[in-house]
Every structure is written in structure tokens, then in C-alpha cells.
Image (cartoon, grey):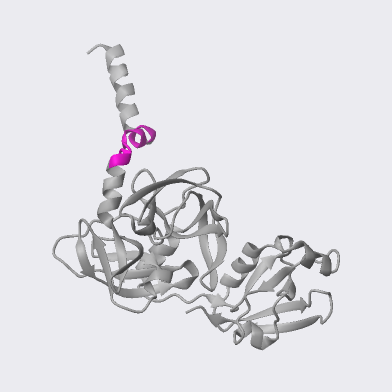
């Protein structure tokens, strides 16, 4: 065999075996195929016969994910889809820190269609695709783009929920729907939308895939630590409030304080300013909640506080409660 030709063959074979070439050969499904795959594994959540949200299967055995703020409602829980029909379902576990519920569909001989959960987050700017049930419309496919790096925390349904921002319009009813990448891997679950009285602001929050995988693996309730209150950043307050606080004040503002909650019992008051947390000045909500989530129920959190006018400076110790 000609040596030049042999050398040429070796080069071609090495290209085919190169990992980068293999990745290129792994063809992405068309958007039409992606829609079909997501539609097969997604379903509508019914509580006492009323459509309350969306959910999706995450393994072939019938385990599925949806949002806690829908699944927690009292009544008969069912799922409905064009592929599966209408089936009863039961709650296995929940994690309020991620507005997440693990449910289980009836066992059957045939494997359930499901969407694999990604082992990593989608990065900023990456296109993502949502299958949802907006305002009682069935199997609607919505496109968005990841809007930030990493996770953040949004306060809704009475507590802080960890999520990833997505630039997308997501009407009510999409909650619990899967956000997928182009390969059909779940990179998040729709949980909430950023809204004002004027309407949707074009930013949605999806639950990170790590939380979905963790609940599927544990199959038991996850109870993160909570203060039973919220905090807000000073620069996000009304201008009149900012004028009342001493100039140069650094910290966070106490909001949504539960009257009989653990923080209130320790002496925290609505509109107090948190000057230090465990001896540290914290000015951003995300930093505060990440610090809190590193603790467990029963731990103590040390707060230095003052009233908004600078008076009543005090130190309190708050015993953290489980977020059930």
C-alpha cells in the first residue's frame, strides 16, 4: 500500500476517534423532536379534578417532579397527559427550599417515558425550552435564555426559594414544567415569574437540576433552616424609608416577619435593620440566605439589629426552625 495513502487513512481515523469529533457527531434533535420528547414525559397536575400546574417524569419507574405550591393543596392528586391518560399519583417527599415535590405514578410493566436530569446548570445566554400548561392551555412549548450565572433566591409562598433566572414569559399554569436544553436534558423546573401589578416582567425562576436529583435520590423530605422572616436590601426600599435611616447604614431590612415565628420570639421586629449576621456585615439577600442555608434547624443565628431610625440597637440569638 502506498505510504502516503496509509498516512492519509491514519489521519482520517484519528479524526473520527477524537472526542471533539464524536461530540460534533452527536446530533442535536430538531426542535420538533425535542417538543415530542418533552410532551411524552410531561403531564398536567390535577387537584380534585382542577388543573393546577405541570409536572414531568424523571425516571422510568414513575417518579416525577412538580412544584410544592401546587402539590401541597388538599385533595385528590392526579396527573393527565395525552400519552399516559389520567392517573392517580402520590406525594413521596418535598423540599420547600426549592418549591419542589417528588411524586410517584402507579407502577406498570412498561417503562415510563422520562427526561434525564442534567448534572450541571445551563450557563448564561444558553437557550432553554419549557413545556407547560399556561392558563389551561395544553402542551405549550416556550423558549427562553438563561439570564444569570449560578443561582439566586426569590421570596414567594412564604419563604426563600433557590432558583436560576430565565429570560422568558411564563404564564400561570407553567409551574412545575421542565426546562430542557437542546439535548432533552432537564436543566431546571419552572417555579415562579417576576411580576408587578403592571404584569409579567419577562424573568422567570427555574429550580436547579441539582435539587431535583437530590430529592429523587433521598426520597424523603428535606427541611432547610429558616428564620420565618424575609430580608430585603436597603437600596430596594422606598425613598422615604431610606431617608429615615442613619446615613451610611449597611445591612438588610427585615420584612415578612411571621408574628409567632422563631425570629419574632427572639425579639426581631418588622422594618428592623440587620446590621450584622454572626459578626459579619451583609448587604445582599443572596449572601444572607446562602449563609443561612449552610446551617441546620436547631442552630443559632446571631443578629445585631437596630430600629430604622438608628435607635434600639440590640443583639439577639435566633434558634433556627425547619422549613416544613
Above or below 31: residue 16? above
- Whether residue 273 is visible to the viewer of this picture, yes or no, is yes
Residue in the image at 49% along x and 70% along y = 97
Left or right: 224 in relation to 281? left
Q: Position of residue 201 (x, y in %)?
A: 55, 52
Q: Is residue 26 magenta?
A: yes
Above or below 56: residue 167? above
Left or right: 24 in relation to 276? left
Left or right: 39 in relation to 95? left
Query: Considering the image in quadrants, where does the N terminus appear?
Result: top left
Marker count (numbered): 0
Q: Residue furthest front?
A: 198
Q: Main secondary structure of the magenta part?
A: helix
Q: Residue furthest right?
A: 247
Residue in the image at 51% along x and 56% along y = 164
Residue in the image at 53% along x and 45% along y = 124
Q: Which residues are magenta?
A: 20-32
Q: Position of residue 200 (x, y in %)?
A: 52, 54
Q: Position of residue 56 (x, y in %)?
A: 32, 60
Q: Residue furthest left?
A: 109
Left or right: 278 in relation to 245? left
- Whether residue 245 is visible to the viewer of this picture, yes or no, is no
Residue in the image at 28% along x and 71% along y = 49
**Which image quadrant for residue 116?**
bottom left
Q: Position of residue 93 (x, y in %)?
A: 37, 74
Above or below 3: residue 93? below
Q: Is residue 27 magenta?
A: yes
**Which image quadrant for residue 67?**
bottom left
Amino acid at each position: 500500500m502506498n505510504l502516503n495513502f496509509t498516512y492519509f487513512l491514519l489521519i482520517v481515523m484519528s479524526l473520527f476517534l477524537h472526542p471533539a469529533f464524536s461530540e460534533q457527531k452527536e446530533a442535536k434533535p430538531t426542535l420538533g423532536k425535542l417538543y415530542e420528547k418533552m410532551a411524552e414525559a410531561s403531564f398536567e397536575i390535577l387537584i380534585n379534578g382542577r388543573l393546577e400546574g405541570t409536572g414531568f417524569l424523571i425516571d422510568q419507574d414513575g417518579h416525577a417532579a412538580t412544584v410544592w405550591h401546587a402539590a401541597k393543596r388538599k385533595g385528590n392528586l392526579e396527573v393527565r397527559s395525552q400519552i399516559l391518560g389520567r392517573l392517580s399519583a402520590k406525594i413521596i417527599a418535598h423540599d420547600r427550599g426549592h418549591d419542589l415535590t417528588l411524586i410517584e405514578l402507579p407502577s406498570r410493566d412498561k417503562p415510563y417515558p422520562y427526561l434525564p436530569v442534567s448534572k450541571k446548570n445551563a450557563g448564561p445566554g444558553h437557550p432553554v425550552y419549557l413545556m407547560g400548561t399556561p392558563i389551561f392551555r395544553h402542551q405549550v412549548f416556550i423558549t427562553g435564555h438563561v439570564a444569570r450565572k449560578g443561582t439566586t433566591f426569590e421570596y414567594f409562598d412564604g419563604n426563600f426559594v433557590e432558583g436560576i433566572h430565565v429570560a422568558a414569559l411564563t404564564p400561570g399554569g407553567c409551574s412545575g414544567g421542565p426546562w430542557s436544553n437542546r439535548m432533552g436534558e432537564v436543566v431546571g423546573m419552572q417555579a415562579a415569574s417576576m411580576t408587578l401589578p403592571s404584569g409579567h416582567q419577562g424573568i422567570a425562576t427555574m429550580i436547579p437540576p441539582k435539587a431535583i436529583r437530590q430529592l429523587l435520590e433521598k426520597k424523603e423530605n428535606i427541611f432547610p433552616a429558616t428564620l420565618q422572616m424575609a430580608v430585603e436590601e436597603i437600596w430596594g426600599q422606598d425613598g422615604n424609608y431610606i431617608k429615615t435611616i442613619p446615613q451610611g447604614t449597611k445591612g438588610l431590612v427585615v420584612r415578612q416577619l411571621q408574628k409567632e415565628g422563631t425570629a419574632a420570639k427572639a425579639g426581631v421586629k418588622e422594618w428592623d435593620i440587620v446590621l450584622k449576621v454572626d459578626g459579619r456585615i451583609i448587604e445582599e439577600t443572596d449572601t444572607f440566605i446562602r449563609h443561612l442555608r449552610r446551617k441546620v434547624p436547631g442552630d443559632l443565628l446571631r443578629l445585631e439589629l437596630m430600629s430604622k431610625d438608628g435607635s434600639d440597637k440590640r443583639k439577639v440569638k435566633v434558634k433556627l426552625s425547619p422549613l416544613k
